[in-house]
Image: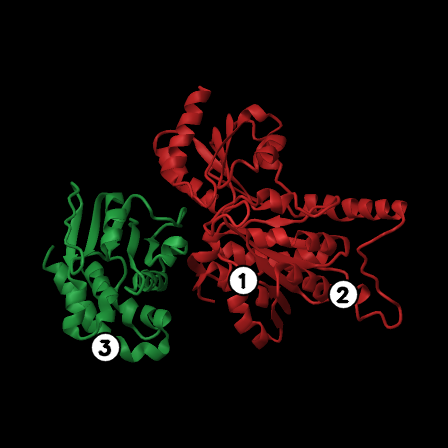
Amino acid sequence: MAKVLMKGNEAVGKAAIQAGCKFFAGYPITPQNEVPEYLSRELPLAGGTFIQSESEVAAINMLYGAGGSGARCMTSSSSPGIALKQEGIGYCVFGEIPCVINSVARGGPALGTIQPSQQDYNQATRGGANGDYHIPVLAPASIQEAVNFIKEAFEIADVYRTPVIVLEDGLIGQMMEPVDFDVPVKKREHTPKSEWAMGYGNGNPHLIEGIVMDAPMCEKKNRRFFKEKYEVIEKEEVRYEEYMMDDAEYAFVAYGSSSRICKTAIKTLREKGIKIGLIRPQTLWPFPQVPFQNKNIKLFIDIEMNMGQMVPDVALAVNDKNKVKFFGRCGGMIPSPEEVVEATEKIIGGAK
Amino acid sequence: MGETYRMSCSGFGGQGVMALGKLIVYAGMDEGKEVSWVPSYGPEMRGGTANCSVIVSDEPIASPIVSQNISVNVVMNLPSFHKFVPETAKNGIVFVNSSIISEKVEMPGVKAYYIPANDIANELGNPRMINIIMLGAILGVLPIVKAESIFASGGAFEHVFGVSKAKFIPGNKVAFEKGMECAKAQM
């Protein structure tokens, strides 16, 4: 099919419908409002249910019910709204509810600003719910990738019976780019929902639980998650892009919008004779390890729209924190490619 | 091969700068080019000014933001003139709505076209067409996209404003040509 021009947020809504999303609940917040706006119009036409909930907390708990009844479901919000959902996300984890959380980050903390930011790296990858858990986090850098990742997120959610976060920033949400909605996404095998979801028990009750009173049983459930879900996800679901890394002596590490700024900076830096490439994690959890084993790289320069939240993950992957440097802007400020070039020259100059 | 146009369109709300940018990216996409469009949506938008970044290129677009090194700089009101004109690239081109901006662009190597868009629109009896007049001026001197891609059936105009607005295409074409003539006379 021909490409169409669409705003990132609307494209996310359309992708969700294409993926078979039958339930959406959300509460308005900039810069993701076009997601619920689009779905309020289009999801009912596709046989789904759209609810503008009374709060973010209500929306995530509606997913607990909808996902727990076997429906493909999604919520969407931005930073402070995602903060409110944390408790509910924890319940979705423990209740093994497949659901997709679209997170369009803006400057923080608190209400912060409405401009694009990556200050929610820790919020997404570490989470704010209690207990031991991981959630797969997909980080698209273009609208095409956002569409593909939303569709994949539903598949991953069903396979591992887990919430999946698609982490964008306000720039991806607000911009328009051509997008092809017919890029195929692999349908995955997963346990039929009739075997576990509410309403399919036929007198054989299905149980979705948020509490396990018996400590040995609770530990057993935790350990099962780590063995059957997280270990497998770390092996099977890691995604990353390497850009101009073949002859690289230095590497940017960046995801989402900041990776695009790095690509522009790479062009300028290479014209100046600096052999630099980009490692772009497309999954933030599980965090890619393989591209960081590259022994030709003298320095890994982490570029983010935050104060360096990904640095510990990069340092662990590189296994040498002295090789990891950082430059970023935060609070809704987007670094210009020129700024990134200047910072990089300073970092590399200092390393000589 | 391969020209990359890094455009900024700025003005106040209602002047149609967002739509101006959208018309160009739709046309660019239809011509098989790489395109991106980024709107301002922050507090500046609530304050009445609006701007968008547009890139039309033969190569994949890395950073979609155009806030520096602007090669095609469209300024529709005075605050935009002061904010964006200093960010024009060397050899860049500025399109100034000279109906409401009396300042001149004084940057070495930068060419400016002064288009009295409001006056032309008023003469045509439709003050809402200033963005189309500006679009005509831009495409009159720069081959970013073809005029046919804007006005053809199923083209950019119908995409941006809706098929039901297609009946306004002839009138808009006149405005477009007026803008084009005005810019060409200054080449």
Query: Label 3: which residue?
Result: B170
Mark 2 Cα-neighbour bin, 10 Å: few <14, some 14–19, many ≥20: some
Q: Mark 3 — on which chain does it sit?
A: B
Residue type highlighted by circle 2: Lys
Instruction: Check disc 3 and report its element: helix, strand or loop.
Output: helix
Q: Nearer the viewer, residue A70 or A318?
A: A70
Q: Is there one chain holding both mark 3 and mark 1?
A: no
Query: Label 1: which residue?
Result: A28
Identify the mark at residue A193; answer none if there is no mark: 2
Residue type highlighted by circle 3: Pro
Residue type highlighted by circle 1: Pro
Q: Which chain is represented by red in the image?
A: A
Q: Which chain is represented by green in the image?
A: B
Residue at x 22% of width, y 70% of height: B127
Identify the mark at residue B39; answer none if there is no mark: none
Q: Mark 2 — on which chain does it sit?
A: A
Residue at x 73% of width, y 65% of height: A65
Instruction: Check disc 2 and report its element: helix, strand or loop.
Output: helix
